[in-house]
Amino acid sequence: MKVLFLVSWYPMNGRSGNGIFAIRQAEALAQAYSRSGRPVSVDVMAVQPRSWTGGKVQRQGVFSNPPNHLQEGSVRHWVQSYRDGLGALLVQVLAWVRLLSAYRRHHGDLPTVVVAQVAWKAAVVALFLGRPYGIVEHWSGYLEEKIPMKPFPQFLARWAFRKARSVAAVSRWLADAVSNFYSGLKVSTLPNVIEAIHGAPSDGEEPLRDPRVFLHVSDLAPVKNPALLFGAWAQSGLAEEGYRLRVAGEYSPESRSAYSLVKGVDWLGILSPPELCYQLKSSRALLLTSHRETFSLLAAEALLNGCALWTSYRPLQVFYQGLPGLVPLSDDQQITWSKALQETITKDFFPWNNAEAMHRVQERLKGYRTEEAGEAMLNWIDGWRP
């Protein structure tokens, strides 16, 4: 059995970054197969523009764990970047051909099944590859009133959806959106994977939670609503009271410079999983200002680390309804968020993350642990593979 993950976004920062959800699901699946005793190879393949990677990247057959002592969950990675600009489509196609040829030389055959992580472009590649495939959708574009995709890519994506053996999405609200857009297409749900490092006791002394520190983690793309974040922070006046807003993520220098004059902001950049865990454990709240979220691993990781979650996104409020640590805001207006921030000055800070509260959070997210999520994906593939 050979499973090939074709991914539309590949994380270029090791264990963090855009697309890490695909790597986590691949590793969880490999572990599930290992526990079942069924022989399998799990590979991840991606072709990325150099504007995403920061330069030329070529990784052929590289294991995520050292090959001399392969561990449960080992995944082989095949990655190549392509030149942006004129003729990029042809160069991109050639890059896919080179990687698939190298894969076939190594394995002696094409994959048994393909898991396409996101319809555009991974599922289109799977379609032309001609192997049985399923689609796992993560793209937030389906949650918009008008999908931000040009007609030809939309045609190819629609074709890929119709030819897939099975289609899943990482939340019920995203599954419903995809189903509605593609006229009743049957879409199930598959869990994202929350790694064990989040919510587990850290080595050494636990960080002290600072009630004067708020955290935001994103790439500052428009969908993450940075204008609301920085506008509400500035309007609240908390910086003058000694409060700090820590901002982490894969944001560009241009995105950072747009808000460089906002006071009381600490720019952390890209964080490793242990560094993110530390920031969540030491901050008062995570400010999740996004217009839309397909699931939000970050929201789950915040609650599992005892960090309060502030959000005005209704599907997340419904998903976490009744859990301690959730701070639902009525809307995404700047005045609403700034008033909520100002109220922190007048209230005493009482950490909510007692043993009972954390148990409730862990139970709500039990299905998103590596073992459970891996079993769910294995069962999903068994339902449609030849």
Image (spheres, rainbow, N blue to C red):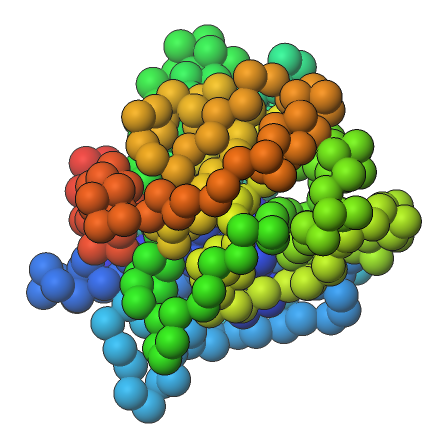
Q: Nearer the viewer, residue 160 or 184?
A: 184
At which x and y percent is residue 268? 68, 63
Q: Can residue 165 be seen in this view?
A: no
At a point 34% along the width and 24% down the height, the residue shown is 321
Residue at the spot 74% in from the left edge and 38% down from the top edge: 233
Q: In the figure, 148 relative to 263: above or below? A: above
Is residue 26 rendered to the left or right of residue 298?
left
Q: In the figure, residue 71 lies in which quadrant? A: bottom left
The front one of 37 and 348 is 348
Horizontal arrangement in the rendering, residue 244 relative to residue 167 (left or right): right
Q: In this view, does 122 lie to the left or right of 262?
A: left
Q: Where is residue 271 in the image (x, y as percent from the top left)?
A: 58, 65
Q: How many marks?
A: 0
**Within the image, what quadrant is residue 151 found in?**
top right
Q: In this view, does 201 lie to the left or right of 254?
A: left
Quarter placement of the C terminus: top left
Q: Which residue shows up at 66% across the image and 21% down it?
A: 336
The foreground one among 205 and 59 is 205
Q: Residue shown at 44%/27% (left/top)?
A: 316
Along the line of sight, the residue nearer the viewer: 161 or 269: 269
Classify the position of the N terminus by image quarter: bottom left
Confirm whether residue 197 shows in the render. Answer: yes
Return the x and y of residue 188 as percentages of the image width and height: 31, 26
**Where does residue 117 sit, x and y in percent of width and height?**
46, 44
Residue 34, quarter of the rendered image: bottom left
Of all residues shown, which one is farthest toward the bottom? 68
| Above-or-below relation of 54 to 285 | below
